[in-house]
Amino acid sequence: MNVRTRTSAIIGTICLAASLALSTASAEESAAPAQAPPVALTEVAKAQNPIAGTAGPGGTLWVAERAGTVRVLGKQGLGKTVLDISDETTTDGERGLLGIAFSPRFTHFYISYTNLEGTSTIDEFAVRSGRIVPDTRRTVLTQVQPYANHNGGDIRFGPDGYLYIALGDGGSGGDPHGNGQNLDTLLGKLLRIDPRGGTPYAIPPDNPFVGDPAARDEIWAYGLRNPWRFSFDADKGDLLIGDVGQSDWEEIDWAPASSKGGENYGWSQMEGTHPFRGGTEPANHVPPVHEYDRTGLGCSVTGGFVYRGEAITALKGQYVFSDYCDGTLRTLQIENGKVTGVGDLGVSGGEVISFAEGCNGELYVLAQSGSVFRVDPA
């Protein structure tokens, strides 16, 4: 069954978060400033190092804290802990509980974390009456990490109903093991699996490298350094990835909803649109739809979401993202894979570590300081 054509219906029913990119930095220089509607950041909760969030049953927002706990946002802020794996992970380096996601129709809950040995792990729990059932826990996928950084760890169900998993290149610096371009490892990749289709999971038959003996079947896209937050446009189904650069360039990668996968985003031959340490641009390189250098305050991109809420009409259709080091909420207007407007919302969330999208399409900003903000009209 081809469910990629049902994007709008799926999202409207169950609140899913949600051509190649040919524009380059030089093309963006002529992009008009994007309309910047007045917005405000309303603090709705305080947490302990909130790192990921996802829309939950009954219109709730579930928030993961890096040390290993998950809590649910209510009218009085974050409630009691609903899941605690703090004795199974560590915050050394860039480790911890790094991602959470609900399956379509909220029947299962998934967590992405590094265990005490540093191995990236995806676990699944059944959900009944909006609650996690602890004794149904099982491990879906693991990947050994050679270093304590560049774990990636974001997870999300796509509009096709499959689970996407972002993994960094394994860490250290400069991709010393060449994982980004190596199709025989899951590191430096965006994966796509069917967690309920097999034991421990099934490979979607239309994954781009199925049948290639030199490639892992789980791979959807490759050439990523440390994909720090990806999302699907809840209206169009397009994929957007914030990929953290090595030392000079931060990038946003884009693929249309019609993509068949297999995109090569270039790392570690390329950093953005620029050869990295004398690298050669791959013939199939998909340049970022947007990049920015580190001559300003930015140093580490934090990917966000295309705004599809109702509260801020003028923001609709714009991709909202940030940078961990400057915290400013930035926007891109993207039309057919080309940036037509670049904007700045004029507000800062501090050390912005992540974004979350509620069932109603409204956006939340998670700051390392502990603040959980909602993006509201000013």
Image: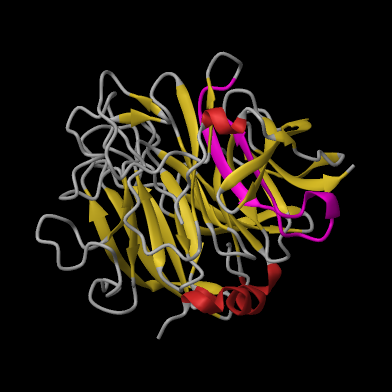
Residue 32 visible to an observer of this rendering: yes
Q: Is residue 310 magenta?
A: yes
* Residue 110 horizontal/vertical position (percent): 43, 64
What residue is rendered at 84% in x and 50% in y?
A: 314
Q: How is the image coloured?
A: secondary structure
* Residue 329 horizontal/vertical position (percent): 70, 35
Point out the stretch of residues depicted in magenta: 298-323
Q: Is residue 311 left or right of residue 231?
A: right
* Residue 208 horizontal/vertical position (percent): 28, 63
What residue is rendered at 20% in x and 67% in y?
A: 210
What residue is rendered at 25% in x and 32% in y?
A: 147
Rendered image quadrant of residue 269 = top left
Q: Is residue 325 magenta?
A: no
Residue 223, compared with residue 110, is above or below; it is: above
What residue is rendered at 40% in x and 86% in y?
A: 1
Q: Quadrant of the C terminus?
A: top right
**In the foreground, 223 or 147:** 223
Rendered image quadrant of residue 274 = top left
Residue 160, compared with residue 364, is above or below; it is: below
